[in-house]
Amino acid sequence: MTDRDKGPTPTVSRVLPDGRLVELLYDPDRRVTALAVGGPDSEAGIHDSFDLADGERLIPYAADNNLIATGCVLLPSEVGGFTTQAELIGQLQAFLHRYVDLSPVFEEIAAHYVLLSWVYDAFSELPYLRLRGDYGTGKTRALLAIGALCYKPFFASGASTVSPIFHVLDAFGGTLVLDEADFRFSDATAPLSKILNNGNVAGLPVLRTMTNRHKELNPRAFRVYGPKLVAMRHSFADRALESRFLTEETGQRPLRPDIPIQLPPELHAEARILRNSLLAWRLAQRSKVRTDATRQAVGVEPRLNQTALSLLSLMEEPAVRDRVHSELAREQARLSEERAASPEGRMVRALAELFADPSRGRIAVSAVAEAFNRTEGDPGRAPVSARWVGWQLRERLKLTAVKSNGVFVLPEGERAKVDALAVRYGVSTGQRAA
């Protein structure tokens, strides 16, 4: 049976073998859908259906599809036009500046993130964008304004049922725009956290238990890779998840007086025009986008560079990249300070002080406990035991203690591991020698 015999295929987007792209359009005025087909070397055409060489017929999703008709997923209405990427970035920044009060650097980051969302499938890793702050500080407004420009944005909230989020991301791809993300899903094992943990790296689907019509177990892999735009009040407990975000802290300064108190209706029409221009940019540039490793920040740990590199690869202006590099350096300093203040960081500091004496061949775990208790600096706090320290060394820091003459010690061979941990937790050589 051929693909044509199977019937037409409802299509949201497709990359064709010849490099052309197929993208779903929706005109809310006429309430019709269509497919735009084009590429860097061909003029875009609008089709009610499109036949592939292998006989498969692509058709657009129906205009009365609830996700499309209600605006839960936003689409371009036609293929617009653009002159240069720099001019398009300027238009995006002007739109955001008109409706949202963001810090200057984050405004630049947000405009480029919108651009990144339209070619995210050209990269293997992505950062997430986050607005974090108390209620009434403009998080949701920023989410709506930035999200309205992104590629196939899907709007949801922390109160949403998780199952449709999996299905929509798998079927539509695009950008997940998530409000109030920390209300129900703070636990690292929550289903939504799995989307966020897996969704920044291509090729890491989430397996979900499904059954077929015969009630047979039939697990399914859901594709969750794509840009994510998140608003929340607090932070996630999972530090690995936290490292995936580029964050704007809202409510840090008085609101600009020129910001409208409510988002006006014309915002939606302006956003649609910009989405049309962004579609034209995607059709022309998607095949040309590449990761540029030379644009990573100097002096920043690999994880932060790995997260931000796709965004930096799209930043044409060196001055803009320099400002983002400075933001990454500040985030690096914050993370280092946070690590150093953690129980693991204080443990590493105690170990570094003990191993600073080159004449010491091995360190008793009880000596580590004594040094750690001295770093606490809280006279009301009960001292920790050598047994607790042994567990921390083994489980948290992955150091191996051995038994010698009836006591547990860290042998000389663990010194190199402690040196590496000292670098990771921000314990400098000068601090160790003190």
Image (tube, grey):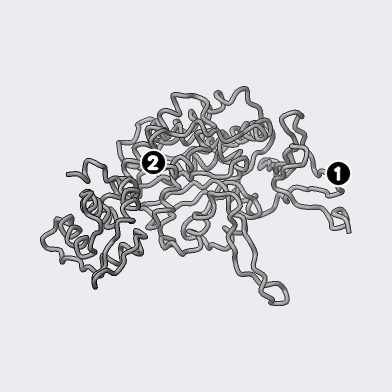
Rendering coords of residue 289 (x, y %): 62, 33
Rendering coords of residue 415 (x, y %): 31, 53
Q: Residue furthest bottom?
A: 215
The reply to whether callout 2 and callout 1 are in contact (CB within 8 Å) is no
Badge 1 local density, few (<14 within 10 Å), some, or many (20+)?
few
Above/below status of 404 relative to 243:
below
Rendering coords of residue 139 (x, y %): 41, 45
Q: Which kind of residue does numbered mark 1 sit on?
A: Ala
The residue drawn where x is 62% and y is 22% is 83
Quick check: 424 left or right of 354?
right
Label for residue 248?
2
Q: Which kind of residue does numbered mark 2 sit on?
A: Glu
The residue drawn where x is 27% and y is 46% is 427
Q: Quadrant of residue 14?
A: top right
Q: In this orientation, does residue 269 appear?
A: yes
Q: In this orientation, does residue 141 appear?
A: no
Rendering coords of residue 230 (x, y %): 46, 48
Label for residue 223?
none
Q: Secondary structure at mark 2?
A: strand
The residue drawn where x is 67% and y is 40% is 29
Of residues 348 and 215, the one nearer the viewer is 348
The number of numbered discs placed on residues in the rendered structure image is: 2
Read off the residue under disc 1.
53
Q: Secondary structure at mark 1?
A: loop
